[in-house]
Amino acid sequence: MSAPSSPVNKPIGAARQVAPVLLILFAAVPALANAADLGFATQMVSRIMIYAIAALSLDIILGYGAMVSFGHAAFIGIGAYAVGIASAHDLWDASITFPMAMLGGGLFALVTGAICLRTRGVYFIMITLAFGQMAYFTASSLSAYGGDDGLTMWGRSEVFGYSPLENETTFYYVVLACLASCYVFAKALVGSRFGRVIVGVRENRLRMQAVGFNPYAYQLVAYVIAGMMAGLAGALLANHTEFVSPSTMSWQRSGDLIIMVVLGGTGTLHGAILGAVAYLALEEILSHVTEHWRVFFGPMLILVVLFARGGLGRLIGGRGAGG
Amino acid sequence: MTATLVAVQVLNGLQLGVLLFLVAAGLTLVFGVMDFINLAHGVQYMLGAYLAVTFYGLTGSFFMALILALLAALAFGLLLEFLVFRHLYDRDHLDQVLATFGVILFLNEGVRIVWGAAPLSYPIPDLLKGTIPLMDGFGYPIYRVAMILSGLATAVLLWVLVTRTRVGMLVRAGATNPRMVAALGVDIRRLFMVVFGFGAMLAGFAGVMAGPIFSVEPGMGDGVLILAFVVIVIGGIGSIRGAFVAALIIGLVDTLGRSFMTDIFKTMMAPAAANQVGPAIASMLIYLLMAGVLFFRPTGLFPAAGR
């Protein structure tokens, strides 16, 4: 979609260091926040990191596979609801609920992806949007689990009977560890033979078919992986707010995720993290200035699309993938 | 009594259908001719309703408000085209999605600043007040009938415009091969502008008509936009005929599903369970329908020629 010229996305120069530097900076946040007596910063940054995981998962399919999913928030919501609903049935153990959240996200991705991936381009965008809405309305009508109002969890997930996540700093580092593992995994994935096939399909589907690959199967697997990763983000998000609500899956949230990925630079992975940081920090700052911050954010977004093609990741990391 | 209820719901479904058609027609035209995906189409619908609120306040007449709101919606559509959209025609769909999403954020919030977050409304004109007796003393509001009729009239008008006029011929040619049309000496940019303005006006018209029966509030266009997407995906992107058929199908399926799904489930399972499952399935129905259509016909029911 974004017409990158190099077939394999290999970061050049400074771009290679962006993600490790970001992760190290993240690791320092709780200590700095405590020192500066800004306790809320830890919570805020853990939310940013959770969305970074989701943006990362979207970048795998959007950036590398050119599958513009406009219903990505649904996977987050499904992950969140898996943990929330389990807690409503007094099931708190993360060793059960987190895999459930990932499986839920993956399963939804498998079923909807099987239909969505039969279509291309704009159809794909709209169909993923419609499935996202479907998940949203389903969650809104779950009256046993709060319906429109959402579902409050009475605590965070436990690990084998202990509840270490209740501690904000511990929770923060768990989120950071998840983000780091997801990044390493995604990095390995896009660098592998599988990742090259995904990029190849993006560049020239027909040619990949001619060489003997089945593009549909590869794309579906990538879609399911992204769904599972977003499901994990959802599970973390539910724990973060101790509350799940349909608004997590609203189509605006899916739009936000696309903005994060594009803002940071598609098909770079570190760009997704950077985009999540930039977007949510901007939201935080602008919303302090005025409750009508979207009036400023909307035009900013338009200007970024019109004039700053390639996103923040390219500005910082030089020419990464394509360009 | 049940027959009356079904008749009322069928009429309600038709009314939702023509409303969706008015929005979807512009969306599918703009996409068909310019290959442009316009998420901001829903806010143009919302803007139509808000403009009608203001003009109604100024003139005190529904029909004056309707005309003025249509003109203002047209002007605003052209302004947006000039400022933002025309710079995006050559971009890929992702850029278009993002930029028009930015327009949505801006306008939804802008409306909140100008008109406030509270729902507004304006009354049905005296001429269209009252009900038409349906059967055994059960009436149906004239205004809703008028909505259905004006929607159908617009559909006929569009059909004549597209198939019987020179502009319509250019639009069809532009949808098939814009570069060839440009090479033959047609100012394709101006054609785009005309189509875009017309689409914005149709969406605004739908908004004005919807104002008295739905509440006029920020974000009211978002739900309609998504439904319109479902409509044009089912109908085949770029096809007006497809949009018309699909809009009526979606309007009917959604309305009838919401009214009768719970009762249907009650014949099969315990009432308590039916009350749970019914509404959930009803709200998913159109998406299931869309998934089904796409599974068998990935380009919709009436794929536009040349695409």
Image (cartoon, rainbow, N blue to C red):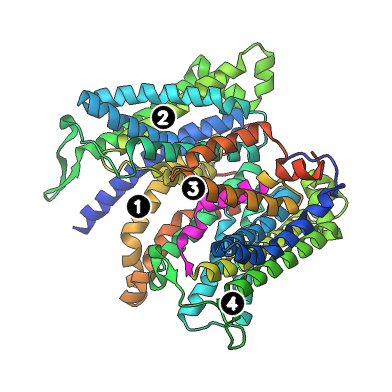
Residue A246 colored magenta? Answer: yes
In this figure, which residue is indicated by the disc labeled 3? A287
The three-letter amino acid code for the residue at tag 2 is Leu
Q: Which quadrant of the figure contains the N terminus of chain A?
A: top right
Q: Which chain is disc 2 placed on?
A: B
In this figure, which residue is indicated by the disc labeled 4? A165
Q: Splitting the image into 4 quarters, where does residue A232 fall?
A: bottom right
Q: Splitting the image into 4 quarters, where does residue B284 fall?
A: bottom left
Q: Do circles 1 and 2 both sit on a common chain? A: yes
Residue interval drawn in magenta:
A243-262
Q: Is residue A286 found left or right of B211 in the rendered image?
A: right
Q: What residue do we see at 64% from left, 66% from top?
A: A30
Examine the rendering and report whether any part of residue A70 can be seen.
no
- Work out whether residue A77 or residue B62 is closer to the camera in this orientation and state it: A77
**Whole-percent x, y for residue A136 in the image:** 48, 59
Q: Is residue B191 found left or right of B284 in the rendered image?
A: right
The three-letter amino acid code for the residue at tag 1 is Thr
Q: Which chain is disc 3 placed on?
A: A
Q: What crowding class fits label 2: few (fewer than 14 Cα within 10 Å), some (14-19), or many (20 or more)?
A: many
Q: Is residue A162 above or below residue A107?
A: below
